[in-house]
Image (cartoon, rainbow, N blue to C red):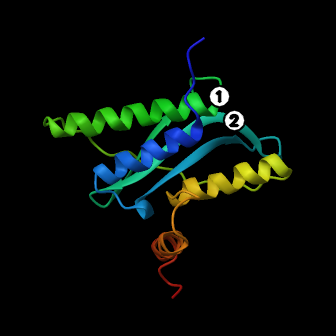
Amino acid sequence: MAKTVDVDQTRREIRHTFSLWDIDPSEFEILWEEDRSSGRIIRMPGARVRYMRNGQWQEVACYGFPNRAMNLRQCFLLLERLRIAEQHGVQYQGLTFTKEVATTTGEAARKESLMDAYDILGVSPDDPIELIKDVFRRKSMYYHPDKG
C-alpha cells in the first residue's frame, strides 16, 4: 500500500503553498466531507480546499480515496501543480462553492473538530494567537459585514 502523508503535514504544506501564492490565511479553508442525510453528522473521507483568488472563491476537492489524509493530499498536490503551472503561463477558471460547518461529540471528535476549525480559518494551532484572532475577525467581517 502507498505511504500516506500525515494530515498535519499536508495542512502545513497547503499553508506554505498559499503563502507562496500570496494568499492570506483568511482567504483559504479546508473543509471535510460529511453526510447529514440520516439526521446525524457522519464524517466521510472526502476533503475540499477553498481559496480566494482575484476576488473569487475557488475550490479543489477529492473524494476518491478511502481516508481524509489521502484525499487532502491529492488536493494539495493539485494546488501545488497549479501554482507551478501558473509560473509557466497556464491559466484556468474559478469554480463555485458550498459552505458547511458541523459540530461533533466525543474526545477524539472534539480534537478533530478543533483542527477542522483551524482548517476553516486557514491557520495552525502553532500560529500566534494574534494571527488567529486577526484571521477570525477578517473572515467574520467577510461573512457578516453588517456586524461591527
Front position among marks 2 and 1 = 1
Q: Residue furthest top?
A: 1
Nearer the N terminus, badge 2 or badge 1?
2
Q: Residue furthest bottom?
A: 148
| Residue 52 on image: x %, y % | 36, 56
Q: Residue at image x 86%, y 50%? A: 106
Q: Residue furthest right?
A: 106
The answer to which image quadrant residue 63 occupies is top right
Q: CA distance from mark 2 to mark 1?
A: 8 Å
Q: Secondary structure at mark 1?
A: loop
Name the kind of residue labelled 2 in the image.
Met
Q: Residue at image x 53%, y 69%? A: 132
Name the kind of residue labelled 1 in the image.
Asn
Quadrant (top left/top right/bottom left/bottom right) for the N terminus: top right
Number of numbered discs overlaid on the protein picture: 2
Q: Residue at image x 57%, y 42%? A: 8
**Going by the image, does 69 lie left or right of 108?**
left
Q: Residue at image x 50%, y 53%? A: 29
| Residue 20 on image: x %, y % | 29, 50
Q: Secondary structure at mark 2?
A: strand
Question: What mark, if any, has residue 44 been given in the picture?
Answer: 2
Residue that mark 1 sits on: 67
**Going by the image, does 138 lie left or right of 85?**
right
| Residue 113 on image: x %, y % | 71, 53
Q: Residues within 10 Å of mark 2 (few under 14, many from 20)?
A: some
Q: Residues within 10 Å of mark 1 (few under 14, many from 20)?
A: some
**Going by the image, does 21 lie left or right of 42?**
left
